[in-house]
Amino acid sequence: MWHVSFFSLALEFVAAQSRIMRQCAGCHPCLKPIIHHESDKVLDWPKECGFILVLSKSTDFIRAVCTRSSIAPSTYEGSSSIKSAKRVLGDWVVNKRLELPCVIRDNLTRFKSHPFGDFFESRLLSVIDWIDLEMKRHTQLGDANESRVLVVYTGGTIGMLSGEKGYSPLPGYLSEHLRSQPRFHDPASKSLCSNSRSVDAFRSWQSLVSLTSPPSSSSTASSLKTSPRSQPLSSSEDEANHSHGNQLKVNTETGIKWFDCLVMPECQEHAKIRYVVLEYEKLIDSSEIETWDYLKICHSIRSNYHLFDGFVILHGTDTMSYTASALSFLLENLGKSVILTGAQVPLSCPRNDAVENLLGALQIAGTYLIPEVSLYFNHCLWRGNRTVKFSSVGFDAFKSWNFEPLVKVGCNVEVRWDLISKPVERQPFRVHNAMCENVAVLRMFPSITPASVRAFLASPIQGIVLETFGAGNAPRKPELLKAFKEAADRGVVILNVTQCAKGTVSSDLYETGRTLAEVGIIGGRDMTTECALAKLGYLLSKPELTPEKIRNLLREPLRGELTPPVRAQFEPQPLEDRLSWLVKKMTYLQALNFPSSYPPLKTFPPELLVETATGSTAQESGSTYQIVGVDLASSESFQAEQDHAERRLLPLLLSSAASREEPILKQLLEISGGQIEAYGLLNHRSPAGLGQTALHLAAFHGRLANVELLLDHGASVHVRDDCGHTALYYAMIKRHKLCVDVLKKAGAHLADFEICDSPIWLETDEPYYS
């Protein structure tokens, strides 16, 4: 608990015209401690700092004097210093979740008794009311380094209870169950679950519990009185919860509502995850799902897209692959994670798979930016439109036979960044609001009659998925082929997929397959039946597309749903050449940071050169490996060291190049683009500074060409840094209007807590969120 008094809070405002804080690590915004002080006397504040905030924890009296260069006085030209400092104070206070206003009011008597009390009291009183307003305005963020996830509960086994007629969903049960479990909800990190990371943590928790725990009878009574509530709060309670970040805003079918949020225990592997369960009024069994339900889920995502960082859809397992495939097409230009999950055994059973599936989906949605519709089940995250349900009894219920998982969760979380889809076009997120329902699946079988096929292809059928044998083969009966050709000629689109679980349709491999292609049947390669059905319904619902155009699009991967024909791949440069180029460019950029009077060393100093037995120097004779006679070409250890060096240098050079006008960024993406993609470095949050990506830095410095280049290579506009801001925010506060326009066209938006009447925003009549 943070206590605020004269010795733990001091504010000093200096002239707004002064330039505050050096810019570090490529001149990107930073929030860093600049002084630590143990005494209780008033500090002499550094005059180069425009704002000082001193905090201390009651047990340690550690002063952390912090400031933010992301909101510099130059941003407030012509404004008063008090206004600048108040803006920084409010933003910083809310990010750290300090309840300053009420605590300051309780401690004002201490200020009056101090010699400098009047000085500080006058300044504190002038901002107390303003801080109240700022905290309410910023509650959508809570902590700066946290993710917000919307859990859409549509129904399914995961939230069912056993009744007289078997398992059925019960409204309100899922949220109450999750709130009662510390692994799903532990906002204050006071549970045993959150204090089991070390012996010391457990002993501290144990001693605290033994001192504060009431008798068992009163504990029971207390638990009954404070049971979680699912009903709307009163107006006064509602306002109090808004101001303290206990609720999150959600757009529902009936309008905006505030929901009690749940907070997962903090973990070193991921940011704090705050989530809300949006439970549909009518919970359905997935076997009864219809096209309208797909559109309803899409509407929930679209209306809350600017409020949350990721989405988890709780769904029944029977038709989960169908829904995942449909959503993958309906959600166009998706830039955030949408993960479907469920369970074979409900949460209400002691032994179940629901806990792991929901925990994994929440952690991935709140930690990694995977802009796809995916499906998480049994420790694997699959591309949704590649999955099929293959088991009705096992926990390993889903497989993707023709595509590897995007993420594997074990002792480590292994993300295959090279498999994750990149943005195809620079367009904002939108939802396609229709799906053609005049589509069906026709499974070939021996002795199938032409009459039954003609009846199946009769109006109003507009498209069918034809499940054929093996690599795309079917009987070559003349009447059967004639029925297919007649349907294709009148505009029916026929898509050929294999009945096999694994494999692809190769229309040119067998004569029977070629015959089907000649009558107008399109080969679907390795698409699943579930995906083929969804893709047909999606394309046929677009009135601007002709049947011929639809047939061409069926051959192309729109959402990674099929494997395209193997094309000639670009051969990367040898690792040694790439590494040499990286070092050369790093040296060049480092030289730009040195003053002219301190040129960087271009060669080794003579005293560092060690002579070898032959009289040559170590620099001349090569590396240590060569000196001891190791064959570098075959040395696995040397190759591993080179790989490690490249992996460490790439993010440094990427960040540095993104913030400059030099052509190095383009060269870097051409030379090491494959490695950057494989390591997921375009959206990598740097551990230095505040966790900005290359796009953050390019936007902050107004490098329009670099912004466009990064976007074209798949950089996401939705990644937030440790302060909770995207690249759009920094482009706006620096007034780089061209960068703002490009980012906005690519789908960037501001969060609610960033939209205010502060002068840092560009003057525009158009909102920066959709």
Image (cartoon, rainbow, N blue to C red):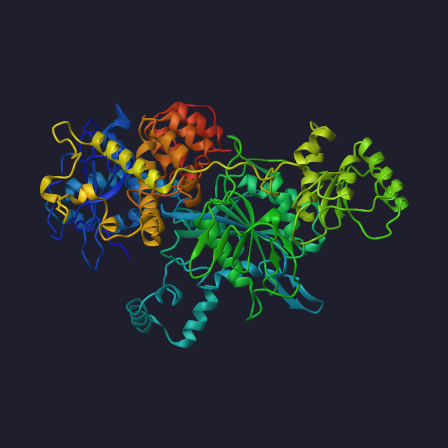
Kindly give the residue lying farthest to the bottom in the view shown.
216
Kindly give the residue lying farthest to the front in the view shown.
614
Q: Quadrant of the N terminus?
A: bottom left
Image coordinates for residue 21, horizontal then vertical, percent: 21, 35
The part of the image, by quadrant, that contains residue 26 is top left
Give the residue at x 42% y 58%. 412
The part of the image, by quadrant, that contains residue 158 is bottom right
Image coordinates for residue 553, horizontal then vertical, percent: 66, 34
Q: Is residue 254 visible?
A: no
How many marks the image carries: the answer is 0
Q: Is residue 346 above or below residue 334?
A: below
Give the residue at x 69% y 50%. 289
Q: Is residue 2 above or below residue 484?
A: below
Q: Is residue 755 above or below residue 10?
A: above
Image coordinates for residue 599, horizontal then vertical, percent: 15, 31
Q: Is residue 483 visible?
A: yes
User: Along the line of sight, which residue is nearer the eye, 604 or 278?
Assistant: 604
The part of the image, by quadrant, that contains residue 220 is bottom left
Give the residue at x 36% y 43%. 685
Q: Left or right of 48: which side holds 369?
A: right
Give the residue at x 38% y 57%. 266
Image coordinates for residue 572, horizontal then vertical, percent: 43, 38
